[in-house]
Amino acid sequence: MAHLLGFLLLLLGLCGDLVSGGQPSAPRPLEALNYTLPTAKYRIQQAYEVGPISALFRMVHVFLYVVQPHAFPEDTVRKIIQKKFEPSVDYEKVVYYEMGIIICSFLGLLFILLMPLVGCFVCICRCCNKCGGKMHQREKEDMVFRRKCLGATLLVICILISLGIIYGFVANHQVRTRVKRTRRLADSTFRDLRTFLDQTPKQIKYILAQYNTTKDLAFSDLNNINSKLGGEICGQLKPVVIPVLDEIKAMATAIRETKEALESMKSSLDSLHSSSEQLNRSLTDVRTSVEQSLQDPQCLVQPGVETCSSIQTSLSQLQGNSELGQLPSVDAELNKVNDVLSTDLDGMVEQGYKSFNDIPERVQQQSTAVVAEIKKVLDSTGSEIDSVTQQLPIKETLDNFIGYMNESEKYLHDILPKVEEADSYWWLVCLIICFLLTLIIIFFNLGLLLGVCGYNRLATPTTRGCVSNTGGIFLMVGAGLSFLFSWILMLLVVVAFIVGANMEKLICEPYANRKLFRVLDTPYLLNEDWKYYLSGMVLSKPDIKLTFEQVYSDCKDDKGIYTTLQLQNRFNITEQLDIGQHTQKLVREFESMNINLDGIVLLDDSGKRNLQEFSECGIDKIDYASYLTQTGKSPTKVNLLSFAYDLEAKANHLPPGNLKNSMKEAAQNITAIHEQQVIPMEQSLVTLHRSVKTLQLTSGSLQGVNKTLYSLDDAQNFITRNISSIIIKETKKFGRTIISHFEYYLQWVEYAITEKLASCKPVATALDSTVQVIFCTYLTDPLNLFWFGIGKATLLLLPALILGIKLAKYYRRMESEDVYDDEPLRY
C-alpha cells in the first residue's frame, strides 16, 4: 500500500513533463475553424459510493471525534518527519494528541488484566460456596420484582450485544467483499492512467493536423483572391458605379425606343396624310353623285319632295377631317435620333460593365507572386510549429513514467494475492470471534427463554423444574464463557482500535481535508536542499512555489498539467510560439502586395457626346397636345355607317325608280368608304396615339440626361480619387482575415497546451481511489466498524455476566431452602 501511495504521489510530479494529454476543449471557434481535442473515456468517473452502510461508518467517526477531538497535529508531524523519528522529538505533544486513544487503550488493558483475574477469584470463591456459590436461596418479599428487573435488564443488554455482533459480521463481510473489489479497482485505475498517457500522442497529432486545416482554409482564400479581395473591392465601388451604368444603359434603351416611336409616328402620319386626301375625294364624289341624283323629277312631286329635301340637307355633313392631313412631320427629329444611334452606346456601356467586372481578374493576376510567397511563409510556419511541438519533453518522461507505472502495477499484482490470503485468515479469525460472541449471547438468551418458560410460581427453590433449572445453567455457562474469552476479545479490540483509529485520524481524515498535503508541502521537509520538493523534482527549481495541495486541487478541477505544474518555468510555450513573430511575416508579405486598377473607364467621351446629342434631338419640343387632340377625333365629321343607314332608310320612302336605286347605291358606296378607308385611318390614329404617348414619356427623361452625365462624372472621379485607398483598405482587411486564422490557431494551441491539454483529473482520481477508496473505505472504515461493534459487545459482557449470575439463582434448583411454620411463600 505504501509503495502504491508513493507511486501516485510521484505521479503528480512526473506528469509535469506530460505537456500533452487529457480531455481538452477548444475556445470559441472563429468562422469555419472549430478545434476540439480528442477526448478519452475513463472507467472511473466519480468517487466511490459507499451506500447505506455509510451511516455505520459515520457513527464510528463520531465516536472517534469524541475520543480524539484534537485537530491534526501538522507541526508535530513535520518535526517528526524532519528529525526522522529521533528520540529528541518532543513526544509530549504526540501523547497529548493521542490522549483519547491512550486512555481508551488503557481502559481496555485494565479490562484485559482484571477480567481473567476477577473471573479466577469468582470461580475459586464459588467453589468454596462463597460469593453465591452455595445452592441456597433466601426468600424475600421483593424477589418477584428483582427477578423481573434482572431479566429485563439482561435482555436489553443482550440486544445491545447482538447489535455489536451484527456490526462485526457486517464489517467482516465488507472487508472480504472489498478486498476482492480492490483488484478490479486497481486494474481500472491503471487502465485509466494508461489511457491518460496514450491520449498524449493523439492530441499532439491532432494539434499539428489542425494547422493543415487552418492552412487549407487560408490557401482556399488565397486561391480565390479574385472573389475574396477583388470581390470586396467591387463591393466598395458597386454602390457608386452600377447605378450610373444602369442609368446609361436605360438611356441607350430609351434612344432605341425613341427611334422606334418616331418611325411608327412618321409611318402613321404619312398614312394619315394620304388616306385623308383619298377620303376627301371619295366623299366628294359620293356627295356630287347624290346631288345629281336629287335633280330627278320625282323630287318635285309628293311624296319625294320632303325626302329629297332631307337628303339634300344632310349632304353637308359628308366631309372628312381636313386637320389630319395638316399634322406636322417628325422627320427632323427622326434624323437626329438616327444620328445619335450611329454611335454604339450599348457597346460602350457593356465596355464599362466589363471594365468594372474585370477587377477581380486583374487583382488575381497582379497578386500571383505575392500569394506564392505567402504560401511559402505559411508552409515554413507549419514547420516551425512542428519543431516547437517536437521540443516538448514528452517521450523521455513518458518512457520513465511508463516504466515506473509498470513496476508499480507488477508490485500490486504480486502483493494482492498475499493481501487476499491474509484477508482470508483475518476473515476467519473475525468470524470465529463473532461466532464466539454469538455463542455466549445464545447461552444468555436460552437461559432467559428456558428460565422464563420453565418457571413455576408454585414450585419451591428445591423443587424447580428441569426446564427452569436448565435455563439457570445456561446463564451460568454464558457467564463462564464471558469470563473465559472476553479478555481475549478485548485484546483484539484494543489492537484493532489503536491501528484503526490512528489510520483514520492520521491518514484518512487529514487526506480528506487536505492537511496531509500541507504537511508534505512544508519547505525543506522531504529534501533538506529543496524549499519546495515538487518544484525541485518537476522543474528543477525548488524555489518556485509548487505544492502538492495546489496540484491536487487543480487536478480535481480537471485543469491541464501545464498550468497545474507551472511548466512555463521550464518550457515557456508562449515564447516558443511567439504569435506576433509568425504573424508579422504575413503582415510584411501583404504590405508588399501592389495592386493597380487604374484605367477603369465607365463611359468614354464619344459616349458622353452621344448622350448630349440625344438630349438635343428635339423630341421634347414636339407639340404632343395637338397630336393627341387629333388622334382623339374621327376621320370624318359624321359617322359614315349611321349616315349610310339613314340614307338607305330615306331611299325606302321614295317610289320605285332611278332615284331610289341611286340613293341605295350611294348608301352602299358610303358603307364601302367606311370599311375601306375610315377604319384603316382609325387604326393609324390609334398607332399614332401610342407613339405620341411613348415619345412624350421619353421626352420627359431628357431632363435626366444631364443629371446622369453629372452622376457619371462623379462616379468616375470617385474611382480615380479613391481606388487606391480602397485597394489598400481591402488588402489589409483580406490580409487580416488570413492572419486571423493563424492567430486563432496559435492562440488555440497556446490555450490547449496551457489550459486543457493533459487534464490531470485521472491522476487525482487514481490517488483518491488508492487512499480514500482502497485504504480508507475498503480497509480502515470496516476495521473501525469491526472493533467498534466487537468492543461494544465485549464491554457489555461484564454487566451481562453479573446479571446472568444473579438471575441464575431464580431459575436453578437449590439444594436447600428457608423453612417457616406458615405456608411457604410462592413465587
Image (tube, rainbow, N blue to C red):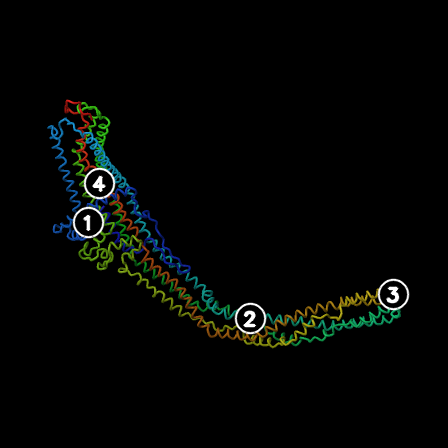
Which picture quadrant has residue 651? bottom right
- Left or right of residue 486: residue 334: right
Amino acid type at circle 2 is Glu
Residue placed under numbered mark 2 in the picture: 247
The image quadrant where one finds the C terminus is: top left
Amino acid type at circle 1 is His
Q: CB of mark 3 within 8 Å of CB of mark 4?
A: no
Q: CB of mark 2 within 8 Å of CB of mark 4?
A: no
Q: Is residue 638 above or below residue 470?
A: below
Q: Nearer the viewer, residue 316 or 540?
A: 316
Q: CB of mark 1 within 8 Å of CB of mark 4?
A: no
Residue placed under numbered mark 1 in the picture: 70
- Left or right of residue 468: residue 222: right
Q: Nearer the viewer, mark 3 or mark 2?
A: 3
Q: Nearer the viewer, mark 2 or mark 4?
A: 4
Residue placed under numbered mark 4 in the picture: 788
Amino acid type at circle 4 is Phe
The residue located at (21%, 53%) in the rendering is 519
Tell me if I can see residue 414 in this picture: no
Structural distance between the alpha carbons of marks 2 and 4: 101 Å
Q: Earlier in the sequence, mark 2 or mark 4?
A: 2
Which picture quadrant has residue 464? top left
Q: In what element is the residue under mark 4?
A: helix
Which picture quadrant has residue 618? bottom right
Q: In what element is the residue under mark 2?
A: helix
Structural distance between the alpha carbons of marks 1 and 2: 95 Å
Q: Position of residue 127 (x, y in %)?
A: 12, 28
